[in-house]
Amino acid sequence: MLRACALALALGASVAAVAVAGATPPPRIVSLTPVITETLFALGAGDQVVGVTRFCNYPPEAKKRAIVGGIVDIDVEAVVTLRPDLVIGEEEQTVLHTLRGLGLRVLPVKCQNLQDLFTAFTAIGREVGREAEAQALAASIRGRFSQVAEALKGEPRRPVLLVVGRNPSLVAAGRGSFLDELISLAGATNIVADSDQPYPTVSMETVLLRQPEVIVECSGSMAGKDLTEEARQAWSRWPTLAAVRSGRVFVSTNDTLLRPGPRVAEALDELVRYFHPDVARKLAPPTARE
Amino acid sequence: MAAGRVTRKRVLLTSAALAAALGVTIAGAVLIGSQLRFADVIHTIVAGRGSTTGTSPETVYTVVVRFRLPRVLLAMLTGCALAAAGTAFQGLLRNPLADPYILGVSSGAALGAVVAMLFLGASGQPGLLVPLAVAGALGAITVVYVTSNVRGHISRHTLLLVGVVVNACLGAAIAFLTALASPMRLTEVIRWLMGVLDSPFAPESTLPVLAAAVAVGFVVLYLEAGRLNLLALGEEPASQLGVNTERTKRLCFLAASLVTAATVSVTGPIGFVGLIVPHVVRLIGGADHRLLLPAATLAGGIFLVLCDAVARALGNLFPVGVLTAVFGGPFFIFLLKREQGRSYFD
Amino acid sequence: MGDILSLKNVHFSYDGTEVLHDVTLHVPEGSFLVVVGPNGSGKTSLLRLGSGVALPQRGECLVAGRSTRTFGRRELARVVAVVPQESHIAFPFTALQVVLMGRAPHLGGLGFETAEDVALAEAALQDTDAAALRDRLLGELSGGEKQRVIIARALAQQARLLLLDEATSFLDIRHQMDICRIVRRLNRERGVTVVMVEHDLNLAAMLAERVVLLAEGRLFADGSPEEVLSEANVAQAFGVEVRRERDPATGRPILLPREEPTGGS
């Protein structure tokens, strides 16, 4: 008797679900930054993404969607002709105003640091009806952070420097950037943790004075292959640096270090590998998600 | 090739012809863009329904009327304003190298705009950019005017000098501020400084207000057009022919500066239009301001609408200022070489 | 006919320096006056006062019986025309367009010239033998041609008083003669009053019935060329010793420097 009721309930529920699903098609979404694209796919809403930027290269399926421009030069006509139900962009992207003015539904999110990131997951999750997935994603990331923190207990905090670009002086990750937060989580101290801006220009003098023991160049996947050699050569001119002498200058082509997104735990793992290689080896691999 | 004397009839005919050309250019420009095919748009207008590619009439309407049309109209007004101001400044300063930005107006507007973009945040106060830019421009105009006005006499050399200094100082201030910008904000600031016709900061009321400013400025300048001709002889000869030179200089400076301030605050400094369009029109139609002013104004509108259409067709990759340089520069050199041999400027 | 131009006890300062000191000068309408004097003696200032571009600090400058202070600029421009030493124009205007500018003080409404204005301008170009230059750009013309166009412009102004400021300075002798001939004809045939500032004393002697010698801002001498251009006057005003001869053909005085230019004995 109980079994029959359960079956009836399940049948009724699935009929209702099909009815609802059949009645309204899932909202079409255009994403205006790679982080938002990654998040949408991570939450399982990848099928709803109809437009992405040309920098949206993860996951691979994202590359197959229609391109609406870069990050600062979004083609408004391209967005409008895709008839999106929702456009999600970075708060700082002024094109959102134009799109709103043309009658499109717009969701601005902030993705500058880790707290922003978790807020963004929730906001995006709510929009696409996947709050549970958003919670789970946030929880798993936080879980990994705790795991790492536990493993790093008692380890010395080394001074480090993360370089994100050159203009042509060094541009580093400073206070307020998500990389700065990851540095702390990875058991190190940022030599420019006292900067005024999230991505300050740092003079070589500062670097020489503050003696980082590890230097990581975050060049991302879009930079050329020779960048690795170039970076190594640039740093080898300063043998007085502890990092250079001990061979702890790393060049990373992972985009995860440039974008605070769903894969931020991977970025943390990578940093731990650079800063505390022995601990990294002993650390258990992250529990698999989906 | 500079034609003979200017009659009322010639001015009216030329203006009518150019106005018609402008209308045609606008109609054509609205049909050009990065996504919708020409055919789609025509099909929608004619058949009233979507085309074979599935683009709905609403989408076509949104793109063509709500997105492209305001931008094309803005391009027209900006082109007209810059050309008119450039003509007036060249006449006022008796200097063929003058452009609307030479007296510091655009640097003032740029400073105001940069402050708005960097410190007030796009999300926070988008409506503040235009007012701040206008404030900056007016500030620059005031400094230049007050400094150059010595006992009621405005010296054009002082005007030029002060303008150069104001541009340099404000440029340094802008460079300083941009050093503090975040990467994304910085890119947007740089784009604005090259001149943009798609700034989302312009409020709804921009087009009518700008149109009013340009119209008023043009009327004031046109009333002085005959006197600008006489001013070309020099201040004393003009005065001896009955021109109140101080009044003419004052009116032209203020009208041209205000028109420039109005457009630069909305679009950023778009280069070349204000310098080259008056020259080209002068080479074709002669230096008489009674014809030059309306002709250059309309030609400026046509020129910028065309440049903007090309910019949009290329998917907005280049700011329109790049295209005005690419088209304007070589054409001007070609025209100048053709007229070489005639000593145009004494 | 009264005085077309009168200066009464005029004091004029420019940039803090007094340039004209207590000058009184009456120019009857229809006369031909040449003003001479060393550099800095105030000759140009005299013309600037006459055309209303400058106002005296003390004393009065009257044109057609009225103080220049009371004239509107256009009004005064209908009475007085000026031919400067040199003319430059910043933009490519043709000679006809430049001559038409002389009609500006007469134009009404939005300032477009009527057929009558054009006819006057063309006639003015004829009068100065410059009709062929009509469609040439002013910048392309030689000095002499340019001056003829500028005089045509002054003519088109239909002014009663023509002021020339060393208008023949940069011209060769032929063009100098052309200009002088035109100006004299205007005076004799049209009754235009001419006040010509000249640096060439012999030209002054040849042209004028009346010469005014200015020195250090004061009226030094005023009268016929005979009376004014004496060896003593020239020595005192210019600081140069001259010999005066008489031109046998015209009977006019000719002044020749007494010293050897190379500084002989």
Image: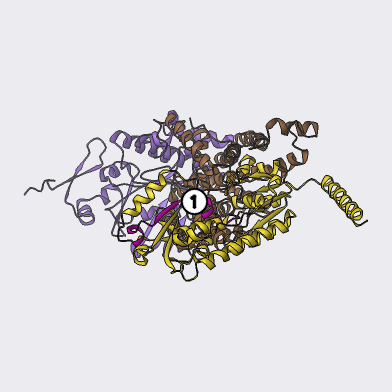
**Residue lying at the far bottom of the rendered structure:** A154
How is colour applied across the structure in the image?
A: by chain
Residue pictured at 37% horizontal, 48% vertical: A230
- In the rendered structure, does residue A213 fall within the stretch colored magenta? no
Identity, as a three-letter code, of the amino acid under mark 1: Tyr
Q: Which chain is purple?
A: C
In what quadrant of the picture does the C terminus of chain B appear?
A: top left
**Residue lying at the far left of the rendered structure:** C265
Report whether residue B61 is seen.
yes
When asked about the image quadrant of residue A225, the answer is: top left
Please give left or right for residue C49 compared with residue C106 in the image.
left
Q: Nearer the viewer, residue C256 or B36?
A: B36
B32 over B243 or under it: above or below:
above
Residue to which mark 1 is pinned: B101
Residue B256 image offset from top left, x and y in percent:
55, 51
Q: Which chain is brown?
A: B
When asked about the image quadrant of residue B128, the answer is: bottom right
- Residue segment shown in magenta: A239-262
Residue A40 image offset from top left, x and y in percent:
66, 51
B12 over A140 or under it: above or below:
above
When asked about the image quadrant of residue A147, the answer is: bottom right
In the figure, what tint was chain A given?
A: yellow
Residue C70 image offset from top left, x and y in percent:
52, 59
- In the rendered structure, does residue A246 fall within the stretch colored magenta? yes
Q: Which secondary structure, mark 1?
A: loop
Q: Nearer the viewer, residue A12 or B321?
A: A12
The chain under label 1 reads B
Residue C186 image offset from top left, x and y in percent:
42, 39
Report whether residue C71 is seen.
no
Q: Estimate how packed mark 1 is, as few (under 14), some (14 to 19) or many (20 or more) residues with alpha carbons within 10 Å.
A: many
How many marks do you count on the picture? 1
